[in-house]
Image: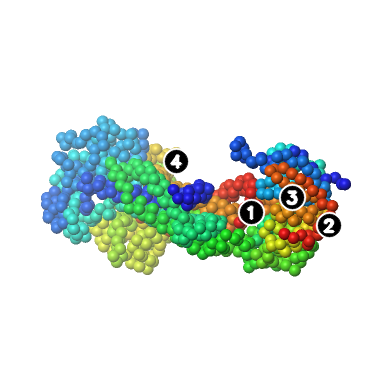
């Protein structure tokens, strides 16, 4: 081993605290990169394989009732590789011990053999016996949520008739990875079930013998999906086509896709921050080291080492820290990626998992950290080159403070000498100080924005469930029914208030932009479910046009005054042109509102409602649920408390977890910066501080000169961090937001107060660590060492 | 003769332990009278700086006692040692140890702000002949000037004892003589006890008492009956 290598190793050991702090910041960035890339790849790979293995359809075409013969024509459409017709039916499941009925979808499976499309994966039990019409398979996640097993029986209401079924098996399907009750946006295992039955049994229950109400189509390579969708709609139009749609609009798939996209977005925005901070720290620390080792550098040069050889020595140190951190990050990344993938598999309910670590993420991680570190190292090299042997061998002249500003008499009287030392040092090296300020501000920004996101999630929940929706119960009807049903609900004892609603499924278009959603018709004086503006005030519902949520306006690029094409997918299926009259705030989904009477008028269906919001007396809730379950028109009853719980669960799992991790990381980064700043300040001033102690300053007074500077830097960094934090929060909020939920970037004092506390805590900890060294410093030794 | 400034009995100092132990002081007995200039001579590692550091309250002995007046320095806590240095002792170092971020006047004020009964910074700087350059930063001063600021800083608090560790070590002989003259003048005018550690044997000429160190012990004590003026010293 060459003596320089020995020196390198010893130097690394000597500065192990700082080296470790920097390596950890790098490791964190690389860990995130490797873990997130691995996660995104694994999830995408697993999803694709799951879809292929179980032949998930590419096109879904719901229809009122079409004869099975029509399937042959569908199969002839160019680009279509497989066709399957099936029966779908809305049902209500009775769960023992629950007065609220649970909504479910009954899906048919061919009597013989497996379906050409949308096959299922049997977790438990056996497949259906087509001779027995009472046998069902139940969605595994739903069964687990209610403790149901093969062999159990289940009561369900199908098409108005109540029947008892026997569960023979539990199954999973790529079609129902996420299940969402109709009219709701948040998936919940417990509150929406899927039942598979043999075609003959289900067709009998829904009067669909020899017919289907949903066609599934598989597409071959290079098929033109748009053309297929148009042709399917054309062919099924006589049978009451409700509008074919592609896999990208399928609810479960949409949800998974958005979750994965949100992960990928986080992956692109957060790791670079860590690597940039690490580069900055390396530059400062190694730069300081070169300054302290000018004698050694001069000596090496005097012995005949070239600039490059000496430079390479210090550069190797940069590389050692960067590479060490990067490798550590790769290891952490693999470990946490594996752990997280397990969590995700459960969350996404994949029956299997393809763990796919992307080798390029390692290469990128290591390469980027080394490149970032080298950028910091280049400045160091310049300093090494600039030192001449003779100059390096002389002790440096005292740092020149003559231009650092004098204090006028009036100010001078207020400042004691230690304070002047602090202030002069700050003004003498404004760039270095600015660097430390920006670094700490970045750390604070990261932590502030993370807490902001957390607060944003909470606000989403509050706004959605306390301000927008103030009802206790939402009732949805099997179809648009007469508004007399509302009167029936109003007459029921214990029901305090009823507000009808008319939800109409539509496809909205503006130019090339398109969105599948619904228009919600509400009463003018709605108070249980309201549209709100950005300030939280209720927006009056208009009869002359749509009140559109900001999210929808963004998707379709709409502004008040624009007109939107509404392709209604219900009843007569008219195509309407409606003006946008106002924008509303919504954090959940992308709703559009209109006056219910006006909506019914343009649909030419007066007096129709599709659901109602109820305010009920808590004491009579059980009786009311039981009564609702018995009403033939009721398709589903959803309790707000349950919907809220589901939403909280959603936000706490999935992409939501990453905010916890980023929060922890923000602490690491803040500490890394503040600790390094404190260490460097100490190293540079060890001799001054020892002199002060010798002259008779107490430990506390000497520490003030050292830590006062740090405190000043931190104090300046706090407001800057607040500002940066707000902008980072805006970026992160948009990365976290999906079409299903929006996370607002809110600015509240408490958030930034806690972030400031994080920084102050990190500063105090590092200050204490350095002060401990200061207290232990050997005064005699410190005075002997020449600067 | 008045009460001695320091009484040292059987003082030992050992660095390290076991085989690697270094005996810096091997039992030193000594009395230093008040108001004298004492020069400590000896080769590197002979123990003179160690003794200076212990008497100055910067380091602690391993054995024996060192008393300042009636105060046993070994019995003081860290806090009390700080107090002792603050109230009674002035230090002058080989490398001046000025605060680069403070002007000459401010460097002196650093001490006068915390001392019990200081002279004014201007007066201290005048004593060392620097009244013209009070507003200069260390980087704008020559080595000799910096050392004079350091001396002004050390005497401004009117210390009982002034410790000088190689005060001329980094200076040319002319500047060095000027610095020594300042020390001598202070001793005469203020009656400050001055201890000077040096390699330059010629400095001994200006001392009341010369302690010759070798191997951690005092080999010889010489009392000068006739002191030279610092300006007469040549090395």
Q: Mark 2 — on which chain does it sit?
A: B
Q: What numbered label is drawn on residue A687?
A: 1
Q: Nearer the viewer, residue A64 or B229?
A: B229
Return the residue at label 2: B188
Asked if labels 3 and 4 share a chain, the reply is no
Q: Position of residue A261 (x, y in %)?
A: 34, 54
Tell me residue B4's x, y (percent): 83, 45
Q: Residue at x 35, y 43 (%)?
A: A338
- Chain of the residue that carries numbered disc 3 in the rendered image: B
Q: Earlier in the sequence, mark 3 or mark 2?
A: 3
Residue depicted at x 54% and y 51%: A675
Q: Secondary structure at mark 4?
A: helix
Q: Considering only order in the chain, which callout, 1 or 4, is on the residue closer to the N terminus?
A: 4
Q: Nearer the viewer, mark 3 or mark 2?
A: 3
Callouts 4 and 1 in the same chain: yes
Judging from the image, mark 4 belongs to the subunit labelled: A
How far, Cα to Cα, is label 4 from label 1? 74 Å
Q: Spatial distance from mark 1 to mark 2, Cα to Cα?
A: 32 Å
The reply, left or right, for residue B221 in relation to residue A358 is right
The residue nearer to you, when weighing A273 against A719, is: A273
Q: Is residue A727 left or right of residue A629?
A: right
Tell me whether marks 3 and 2 sit on the same chain. Answer: yes
Q: Is residue B83 visible?
A: no
Do marks 1 and 3 share a chain? no
């Amino acid at each position: 081993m060459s003596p320089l290598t020995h020196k390198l190793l010893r130097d690394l050991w000597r500065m192990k605290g700082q080296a470790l702090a920097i390596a950890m910041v790098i490791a964190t960035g690389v860990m995130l990169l490797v873990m997130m890339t691995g996660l995104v790849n694994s999830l995408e790979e697993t999803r694709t394989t799951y879809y292929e293995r179980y032949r998930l359809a590419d096109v879904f075409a719901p229809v009122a009732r079409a004869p099975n013969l029509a399937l042959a024509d569908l199969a002839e459409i160019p680009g279509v590789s497989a066709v399957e017709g099936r029966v779908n039916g809305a049902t209500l499941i009775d769960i023992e011990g629950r007065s609220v009925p649970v909504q479910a979808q009954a899906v048919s499976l061919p009597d013989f053999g497996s379906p050409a499309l949308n096959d299922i994966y049997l977790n438990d039990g056996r497949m259906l016996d087509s001779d027995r019409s009472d046998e069902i398979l139940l969605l595994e996640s739903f069964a687990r949520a209610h403790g149901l097993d093969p062999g159990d029986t289940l009561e369900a209401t199908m098409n108005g008739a109540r029947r008892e079924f026997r569960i023979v098996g539990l199954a999973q399907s790529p079609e129902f990875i996420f299940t969402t009750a109709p009219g709701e946006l948040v998936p919940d295992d417990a509150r929406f079930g899927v039942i598979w039955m043999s075609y003959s049994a289900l067709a009998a229950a829904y009067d669909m013998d020899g017919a289907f109400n949903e066609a599934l189509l598989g597409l071959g390579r290079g098929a033109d999906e748009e053309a297929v969708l148009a042709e399917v709609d054309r062919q099924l139009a006589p049978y009451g086509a409700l509008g074919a749609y592609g896999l990208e609009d399928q609810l479960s798939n949409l949800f998974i896709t958005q979750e994965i996209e949100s992960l990928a977005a986080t992956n692109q925005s957060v790791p670079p921050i860590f690597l940039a901070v690490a580069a900055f720290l390396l530059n400062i620390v190694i730069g300081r080291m070169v300054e302290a080792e000018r004698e050694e550098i001069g000596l090496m040069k005097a012995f005949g080492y070239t600039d490059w050889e000496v430079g390479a020595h210090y550069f190797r140190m940069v590389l050692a820290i960067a590479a060490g951190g990067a490798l550590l990050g790769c290891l952490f990344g693999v470990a946490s990626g594996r752990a997280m993938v397990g969590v995700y598999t459960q969350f996404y309910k994949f029956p299997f998992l393809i763990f796919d670590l992307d080798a390029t993420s390692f290469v990128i991680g290591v390469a980027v950290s080394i490149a970032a570190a080298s950028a910091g190292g280049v400045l160091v090299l310049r300093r090494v080159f600039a030192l001449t042997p003779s100059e390096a061998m002389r002790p440096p002249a005292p740092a020149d403070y003559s231009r650092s500003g004098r204090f006028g008499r009036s100010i001078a009287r207020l400042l004691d000498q230690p304070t002047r030392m602090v202030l002069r040092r700050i003004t003498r090296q404004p760039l270095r100080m600015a660097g430390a300020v920006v670094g700490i501000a970045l750390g604070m920004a990261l932590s502030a924005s993370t807490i902001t996101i957390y607060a944003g999630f909470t606000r989403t929940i509050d706004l959605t469930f306390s301000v927008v929706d103030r009802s206790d119960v939402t009732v949805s009807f099997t179809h648009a029914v007469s508004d007399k049903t509302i009167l029936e609900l109003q007459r029921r004892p214990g029901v305090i208030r009823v507000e009808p609603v008319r939800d109409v499924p539509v496809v909205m278009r503006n130019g090339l932009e398109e969105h599948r959603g619904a228009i919600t018709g509400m009463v003018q004086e709605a108070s249980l479910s309201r549209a709100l503006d950005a300030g939280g005030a209720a927006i009056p519902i208009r009869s002359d046009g749509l009140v559109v949520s900001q999210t929808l306006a963004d998707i379709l690029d709409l502004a008040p005054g624009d007109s939107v094409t509404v392709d209604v997918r219900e009843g007569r299926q008219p195509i309407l042109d409606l003006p946008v009259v106002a924008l509303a705030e919504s954090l959940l989904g992308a709703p559009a509102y209109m006056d219910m009477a006006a909506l019914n008028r343009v649909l030419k269906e007066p007096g129709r409602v599709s659901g109602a919001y109820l305010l009920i007396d808590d004491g009579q809730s059980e009786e009311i649920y039981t009564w609702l379950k018995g009403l033939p028109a009721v398709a589903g009853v959803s309790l707000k408390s349950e919907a809220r719980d589901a939403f909280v669960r959603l936000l706490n799992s999935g992409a939501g977890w990453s905010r916890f991790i980023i929060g922890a990381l923000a602490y690491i980064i803040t500490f890394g910066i503040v600790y390094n700043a404190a260490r460097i300040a100490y190293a540079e001033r060890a001799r001054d501080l020892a002199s002060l102690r010798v002259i008779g300053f107490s430990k506390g007074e000497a520490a003030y000169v050292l830590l006062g500077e740090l405190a000043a830097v931190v104090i300046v960094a706090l407001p800057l961090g607040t500002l940066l934090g707000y902008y980072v929060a805006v970026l992160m909020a948009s990365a976290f937001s999906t079409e299903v939920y929006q996370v607002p970037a809110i600015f509240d004092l408490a958030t930034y107060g806690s972030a400031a506390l994080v920084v102050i805590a990190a500063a105090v900890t590092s200050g204490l660590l350095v002060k401990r060294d200061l207290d232990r410093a050997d005064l005699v030794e410190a005075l002997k060492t020449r600067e | 003769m008045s009460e001695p400034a320091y009484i040292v009995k059987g003082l030992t100092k050992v660095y390290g332990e076991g085989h690697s132990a270094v005996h810096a002081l091997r039992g030193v007995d000594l009395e230093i009278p008040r108001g004298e200039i004492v020069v400590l001579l000896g080769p590197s590692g002979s123990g003179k700086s160690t003794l200076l550091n212990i008497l100055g309250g910067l380091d602690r002995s391993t054995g024996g006692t060192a008393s300042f007046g009636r105060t046993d320095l070994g019995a003081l806590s860290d806090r009390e040692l700080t107090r002792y240095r603050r109230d009674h002792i002035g230090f002058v170092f080989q490398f001046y140890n000025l605060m680069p971020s403070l002007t000459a006047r401010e460097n002196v004020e650093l001490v006068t702000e915390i001392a019990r009964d200081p002279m004014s910074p201007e007066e201290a700087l005048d004593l060392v002949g620097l009244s013209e350059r009070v507003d200069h930063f260390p980087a704008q001063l020559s080595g000799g000037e910096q050392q004079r600021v350091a001396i002004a800083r050390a005497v401004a608090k009117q210390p009982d004892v002034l410790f000088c560790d190689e005060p001329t070590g980094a200076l040319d002989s002319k500047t060095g003589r000027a610095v020594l003259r300042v020390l001598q003048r202070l001793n005469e005018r203020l009656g400050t006890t001055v201890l000077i550690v040096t390699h330059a044997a010629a400095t001994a000429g200006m001392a009341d008492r010369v302690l010759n160190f070798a191997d951690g012990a005092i080999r010889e004590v010489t009392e000068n009956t006739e002191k030279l003026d610092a300006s007469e010293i040549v090395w």
